[in-house]
Image (cartoon, grey):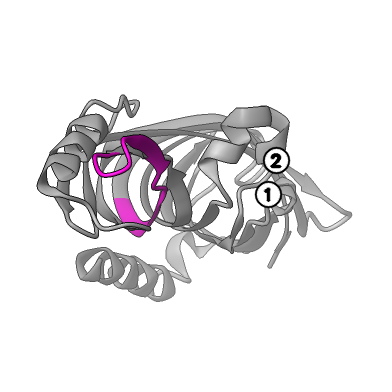
Amino acid sequence: MKTHLLLIGLLASSLLSAQNFGGSSEKKNTIKTNVTAYAFRNINLSYERSFSKTIALNIGFATMPTGGVPFMDTFIKGDDRKEIGDVKLGTTAITIEPRFYFGEKYNSGFYLAPYYRYTNVKVDQLRYNYVMHDDITNTDVDNPIDLNGKFSANSFGLMLGVQWLLGSQDNWVLDFWIVGGHYGSASGDLVGKTQYTLTPDQQKELQDELNDLEIPLVKHKTEINANGGTVKLDGPWAGLRSGLSFGYRF
């Protein structure tokens, strides 16, 4: 993370030192926010700095405070919803995005934007419903595990969008992110505790169950003890971006 922050600092320094680049009287700074993201409890802000009519650099920050997963009840219902439990999710993302514009006006029209994205995800109360066999009572006992932890991802992608300049002085901006896709790698740990102490046989049974779980894209490995265990995540990471930003140009 320190390396990523250093990179952002160097880019910001470059932007500040290039304020008179090209000698143009055009407005070179834009502050924007993706208004569609607020429906997902995502608070965000981006700063775009122009270097010429066709080239700019956009740096964005977005965060979703830890809370319920947006619209989860729409997609997961009934018993599946009960099994997941009262899961909480929080995210933070930093995106560094050079832009190449093809419009007639300064930094407007269709654009292509290769980008780097750092993402940090926090997960709380993700339930795994483990049913263990009690040899003493010869019955099956529910022993749910609430997993908590976080993981981070580094990815690179490409976005296609279109930006319009509005107002009599072109000082308002409407930025439509048509579609963007990124791919990279992620790693992190999820730690959970069982309600009941596990015997060595039950520990092995639980570890085998968790190792056999199919988690799309991400590789995982489990370490189980008498009171719970850790799920270590490591593998590919992919995502899509789309949205509509509104901003001010100065």
Mark 1: few/some/many CA within 10 Å (<14, 14-19, 20+) = few
Residue at x-position 17% and y-position 45%? 203
Q: Where is residue 210 in the image (x, y as percent from the top left)?
A: 25, 35
Residue at x-position 60% and y-position 39%? 82
Near-viewer residue (113 or 121): 121
Please state, as top left, top right, bottom left or bottom right, where the C terminus lies in the image. bottom right
Q: In which quarter of the image is residue 218?
A: top left
The local secondary structure at tag 2 comes to: loop
Q: What residue type is labelled 1?
A: Phe
Chain-order first, disc 2 or disc 1: 1
Residue 20 magenta: no
Q: What residue type is labelled 2?
A: Phe
* Residue, far front: 137
The local secondary structure at tag 1 comes to: helix
Residue at x-position 50% and y-position 64%? 23
- Proximity of marks 2 and 1: CB atoms separated by less than 8 Å: yes
Near-viewer residue (149 or 210): 210
Badge nearest the viewer, 2 or 1: 2
Residue 113: give its label: none
Residue 110 appears in the figure = no
> Which residues are drawn in magenta?
134-152
Residue at x-position 27% and y-position 63%? 4
The residue singled out by tag 2 in the image is 71
The residue singled out by tag 1 in the image is 40
What is the chief secondary structure element of the magenta stretch? strand
Q: Distance between the residues labelled 2 and 1?
A: 8 Å
Count up the numbered dots: 2
Near-viewer residue (90 or 211): 211
Is 162 on the left-hand or right-hand side of 225?
right
Asked if residue 113 is positioned above or below residue 12 in the image, the reply reads: above
Please state, as top left, top right, bottom left or bottom right, where the N terminus lies in the image. bottom left
Residue 164 appears in the figure = yes
